[in-house]
Image (tube, rainbow, N blue to C red):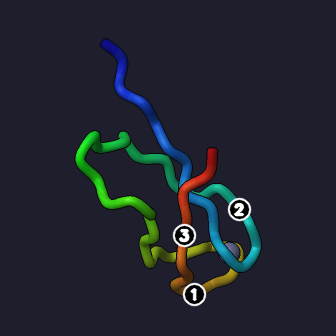
Amino acid sequence: MSKKKVALACSECGSRNYSIAENVNRAERLEVKKFCKYCGKHTIHRETK
Ligand SMILES: [Zn+2]
């Protein structure tokens, strides 16, 4: 079995800064506050499909 990976994109500039392994039992919507080097600050990052 292969683990599914999800890319996290900055909600402000849209850059895909992070990718994580998808957890089967994760919450419905994935939103993480992470540092965006393009924005130069912490922004909400959302999963992309
Ligand atoms: Zn950004």
Give the camera-side residue of 36 and 6. Answer: 6
Say how many tags the image has.
3
- What amino acid is at disc 2? Ser
Horizontally, residue 24 falls left or right of residue 5, namely: left
Q: Where is residue 21 in the image (x, y as percent from the top left)?
A: 36, 40
Query: Which residue is at a point 28% across and 53% down the rendered structure image?
Result: 26
**Where is mark 1, residue-wise?**
41
Front residue of 27 and 14: 27
The dot on residue 45 is 3
Q: Marks 3 and 1, Cα distance to the nearest angstrom? A: 12 Å
> In the rendered image, which quarter contains the C terminus?
top right
Q: Is mark 2 on a helix, strand or loop?
A: loop
User: CB atoms at circles 1 and 2 under 8 Å apart?
Assistant: no
Query: Circle 1 sits in a helix, a strand or a loop, which is it?
Result: strand
Q: Is residue 7 left or right of residue 27?
A: right
Ligand number 1: quarter of image: bottom right
- Label 3 sits on a secondary structure element that is strand
Beta carbon of the mark 2 residue lies under 8 A of ligand 1: yes
Quick one: quadrant of the N terminus?
top left
Few, some or many residues within 10 Å of mark 1 (<14, 14–19, 20+): few
Which residue is most to the top?
1
Labelled disc at residue 15: 2
Question: Which residue occupies the extreme right position in the image?
Answer: 13
